[in-house]
Image (spheres, rainbow, N blue to C red):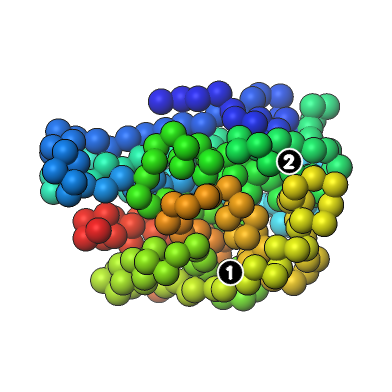
Amino acid sequence: QRHSGKRVVASASRINVDSGQVFRQAQDTEQSRSARMTDKSKTICLIGKSIIFDSGGLSLKPSDSMMDMKIDMAGGATVLGIFKVLSKLDNIKHIIYGILPVCENMPSGKAMRPGDIATAMNGKTIEILNTDAEGRLTLADALSYAEKKLAPDLIIDLATLTGACMVALGKEITGMLGNQEVGLKLLENSTKNTGEQLWRLPMYKRYLKKMTNGIADLKNVGGGRWGGTITAALFLNEFVEKTTWVHLDIAGSAYNDENSYAVISKGGTGWGVETLVELIKNY
């Protein structure tokens, strides 16, 4: 199903003439509905960052940093890849939703500007200080939408979100953060059978102060050069009230630009498809 851009999705998409869109896909079979009636089924929501191209907007990236920005939709592509696999399996007992907040980050006469204030779906206001931190704006509304409209037991988002994650973990390891131990353990256990690498980073809540001392409820950036992966996850956490949530920063692992993977050619890696299918099968 397609929903016109929610509040900050629409704000992020003002960098382009077209309005943003939120796409929702459901894998809800007769088998899963029957299982749900007996309380054996869970509802899982997968969210994939889907910036079709990221120029940085008015906070324009250097040209060298723009060359591979077609990969900024890797989170959404991964979610679609997961659904393609699930469609071929007949033993999935859970109800799975996929949400793709889709837009592109391009400068234009209608572009969002540094200093703009946007209001998210959950009512929180966001001061946009850097238009190149647009992905978290789209994810904010996707997270709020998932929790309020779908009431899932588990939310997992995948996003090529921060260059800081590559600085910390390199280009083959995904950064993982979340709000509850149970969700983090589910992901860690699932990777044991797939070989996809991830590493848990701390949700150090004192860093949130770097994003709450402005003129709105939140700033979309904070902390300067330091701890960018953590502050981005803390920002997203403000849009999840109580649902178990895991954030996967695939900024490095989503794209192989140096043939660093022994068995994957240059280009998109599909990181996360195997691990999340494994999680869904065994949840």
Q: Give the residue displayed 59% in from the left and 30% down from the top.
A: 6
Q: Label 1, on which residue?
A: 203
The amino acid at mark 1 is Met
Across and down, in percent, residue 53 comes to: 63, 42
For residue 44, above or below residue 22: below
Residue position for label 2:
125
Q: Is residue 18 visible?
A: yes
**Quadrant in which residue 166 is drawn:** bottom right
Relative to 85, 246 lies left or right: right
Who's the residue at 48% across and 46% down the image?
Answer: 48
Q: Quadrant of the N terminus?
A: top left
Q: What kind of element bears circle 2? A: strand
Observer-nearest of 47 and 143: 143
Amino acid at dot 2: Thr
Dot 1, crowdedness within 10 Å: few (<14), some or many (≥20)? some
Q: Residue at x 79, y 32 (%)?
A: 111
Q: Is residue 245 left or right of residue 89?
A: right
Residue 246, position as x, y percentages in the image? 46, 59
The quadrant where residue 17 appears: top right
State the CA–CA distance, disc 1 to disc 2.
22 Å
Graded by Cα atoms within 10 Å as few (under 14), some (14 to 19) or many (20 or more), the crowding at tag 2 reads some
Q: Quadrant of the C terminus?
A: bottom left
Q: Tell whether 261 sits left or right of 235.
A: left
Residue 49 shown left or right of residue 1 in the figure: right
